Image: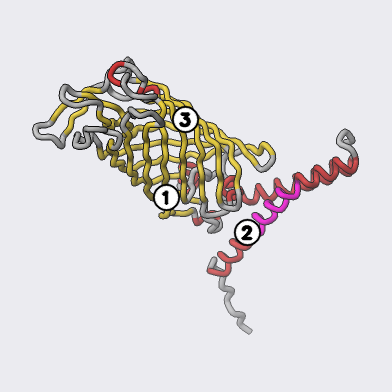
Amino acid sequence: MQTAPVVPETAGPNHAASSDLKLRQLLGTYRAVEQLEPWVVWSVGWSVGWSDKSQPASALTLELASLKAAALAALAADRVVGPRYDVVIEGGVVDAEGGGDLGPSVNAPRLGTTSAFVRLEVETAHLDIGAGWDAGLGFQVGWQPMLTMTTSASRPVLPAYRDGFTTSQSFRFAKSSSTTETAIVGRVGATRLSLAPVLDRNSSPNQLFAIADNGIAEWALVFDAGVDFRWYDRDVWLEHLAAQTLEPLVDVHVGLRHDQRFHRAGDLSEFDDPTGRLVFGFMVNPIRITDRGAGGIGNTRLTFGGGFEFEGALRGPTRLPSGFRIVLAGRLDLPRAWTAGK
C-alpha cells in the first residue's frame, strides 16, 4: 500500500496570526507583571515588615522578576524591546520668514529662506521617579535656518533667517496617560551663525543687509523651558518598552527662551528685553512605515510629516521682530533601521 507524500507546512496566514497572538500574550504578561510588581513589594513589606528579608518575601519578588525577565527576553528576540535610548535623524525642507512687530516698516523686505535642514536627536530611556512621573535626558545637534537680525543704511532692524549650527542638551520630567505624554522640558545649548551680510534676492537690484552688531560673536548661548505634549499612535508604556519616544504622531510645544544672540546692546539696544522669546510649534507625522518583523505591533522605522514654529518677543512696547518656520520632514529611527538591515 503506497502512502501519500508528506507536504511540509508553509508559513501562511495562520502562522502569522499565531505569532502575532503569541507576541500580544507576551506583551500582556509583561504589562501585568510591571503593574503588579510595586503592589506586591508594598504588600509584602507591609505584612512582614520592611526590615525583614524573609524567604517567602524574597521568593515572591524573585518569581515576579523571573517572569518579567523571561517575557523581556522573548520580546527582545522578536525585536520589540528597544535599546536604552532612541536615536532619530530628521531631514527635510524649511520655509522660514521674518514678520510681525515691524512697526512702520510693514513694507520692508522679508529676508527669509527656503533651505534643507538636518538634525540628530537622542533621548535616553525614561526613569520612573514615582507618582506616575518619569525623567529622561536628550541631546540634539543639527544644521538649520535660525532667526537673526539685520540692518542697513536705509532700513531699521529687520528679521532674517540664516542657516547655522545648533547643539543642545535637554532634560524632561513627564507624566503619561494611555497614549499621551505631557512633560516639563528644559534645554541648554549653543548656536553658531555666520556674521557675513545677508543678501535680499527679492529686491532689484539685490541688497546686502549686515548682521546687527550687538557685541555677540558667531557662537551664542541659548536656554529655554516649556511644556511638551506628545500623542502617540499606541500606548505610551509600549513606546517606552520599544525605545521609540521620539516618534509621536503629534508633538506640540510651547515655552520661553533666552537667546543670547539677541543681547540688548549696540543695534539692538532700543528693544525691550530682546533676549526673551516666546516659542510655539507643532509637528504632525501621519505617514508611518513600521517594522513588520516585530510581530506587526507597529514599531516605527520611518515617518513623514510637517509642522510650524513661531518665535516672537516676550514683552515690552518696543519688541524685537518675530519669525516663523514651516517644515516638511522625514524622520528615520536609526536603531530600528539598523536592526531591519541585519
**Residue depicted at x 12% and y 31%:** 206
Q: Magenta residues? A: 23-37
Chief secondary structure of the magenta portion: helix
Q: Earlier in the sequence, mark 3 or mark 1?
A: 3
- The mark closer to the camera, 3 or 1, is 3
Which amino acid type corresponds to the residue marked 3 in the rendered image?
Answer: Asp
Which residue lies under the disc numbered 1?
284
| Whole-number angstrom distance, CA of label 3 to CA of label 2 | 40 Å
User: 177 or 275, which is in the foreground?
Assistant: 275
Which amino acid type corresponds to the residue marked 1 in the rendered image?
Answer: Val
From the top left corner, tell me how far across and down residue 23 is, in percent.
62, 58
Relative horizontal placement of residue 267, taking residue 128 as reference (left or right): left
Q: Residues within 10 Å of mark 2 (few under 14, many from 20)?
A: some
Which residue lies under the disc numbered 2?
24
From the top left corner, tell me how far across and down residue 108 is, in percent.
19, 34
| Whole-number angstrom distance, CA of label 3 to CA of label 1 | 22 Å
Answer above or below: position of 93 versus 261: below
**Residue depicted at x 62% and y 51%:** 75
Q: Which of marks 2 and 1 is nearer the N terminus?
A: 2
Answer above or below: position of 235 versus 327: below
- The mark closer to the camera, 3 or 2, is 3
Q: Residues within 10 Å of mark 1 (few under 14, many from 20)?
A: some
How many marks do you count on the picture?
3
Which amino acid type corresponds to the residue marked 2 in the rendered image?
Answer: Arg
From the top left corner, tell me how far across and down residue 266 is, in percent.
29, 16
Residue 48 lies in the magenta stretch: no
Which residue lies under the disc numbered 3?
224
From the top left corner, tell me how far across and down residue 128 is, in percent.
66, 39
User: 91 or 166, which is in the foreground?
Assistant: 166
